[in-house]
Amino acid sequence: MLKIVQAPNPILNKKTTLVKKIDDELVKLADEMIKTSRVVNGIGLAAPQIGKSIRFCIINLEHLGLPPFALVNPKIVTKSWKKVELEEGCLSIPGIFGIVKRPVEITVEAQNLDGKKHKFDADGMLSRVIQHEVDHLDGILFTSKIIRKTSGKPDEKM
């Protein structure tokens, strides 16, 4: 299992650099990140959270029936006007939860682990998790977007 970096580590507040080469090492890293997310019950994990300042993350929504996948150099290219408020938490900031307002739908451009560029639309939980992870890649923590703090576990719907 990979060690998860905790705030206030400065790597969490730093904008990441683009991945220049997709190789076996990156594929192995994706696999380790997915395994780690399963162990810690995470639904997403960005490279800075494991100490790597590269534009790379994994999304793991297996509990919703979606296979886990990696996003290389993801970029959100459009966001819907409609927004929704939901509770969020973060593996790098344990014990802190809060309501964050985010666009319901987004369009994402990224590469997969085969190096193929793709563009796709996401809504609901997938949209929210991608936005949270892309924020990590831009050095932004969810705590800077909290409308109001909450306590306890995040909503089951999340």
Image (cartoon, helix red, strand yellow):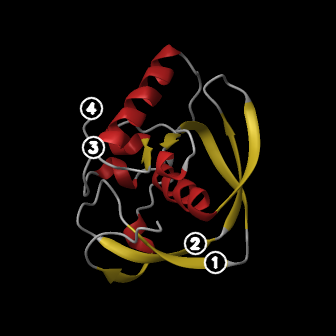
Callouts 3 and 4 close, C-beta under 8 Å: no
Q: Nearer the viewer, residue 102 or 13?
A: 102
Mark nearer the N terminus (4 vs 2): 4
Q: Is residue 31 above or below residue 53?
A: above
Q: Is residue 41 left or right of residue 24?
A: left
In-front residue for pair 13/70: 70
Q: Is residue 30 left or right of residue 22?
A: left
Residue tagged by mark 1?
83
SS assignment at label 2: strand
Q: Secondary structure at mark 3?
A: loop
- Determine the secondary structure under disc 4: loop
SS under mark 1: strand
Residue at 26% from the left image edge and 56% from the top image edge = 7
Residue annotated with mark 4: 1
Residue type (three-letter) at the residue carrying disc 4: Met
Circles 1, 2 touching at the beta carbon (< 8 Å):
yes
Disc 4 to disc 2, how far (Cα)? 30 Å
Residue 10: image location, x then y, percent: 30, 51
Pointer 4 with pointer 1, Cβ within 8 A: no
Label 4: few (<14), some (14–19) or many (≥20) C-alpha neighbours in 10 Å: few
Q: Within 10 Å of the Cα at label 2, are there few (<14), some (14-19), or many (20+) other Cα atoms?
A: many
Q: CA distance from mark 1 to mark 2?
A: 5 Å
The residue closer to the viewer here, 10 or 114, is: 114
Q: What residue does disc 2 label?
A: 102
Which quadrant would residue 125 be assigned to in this image? bottom right
Dot placed on the residue nearer the N-terminal end, 3 or 2: 3
Q: Whole-percent x and y of residue 56?
A: 51, 38
The type of residue carrying mark 1 is: Lys
Q: CA distance from mark 1 to mark 3?
A: 30 Å
Residue matched to label 3: 4
Q: Residues within 10 Å of mark 1 (few under 14, many from 20)?
A: few
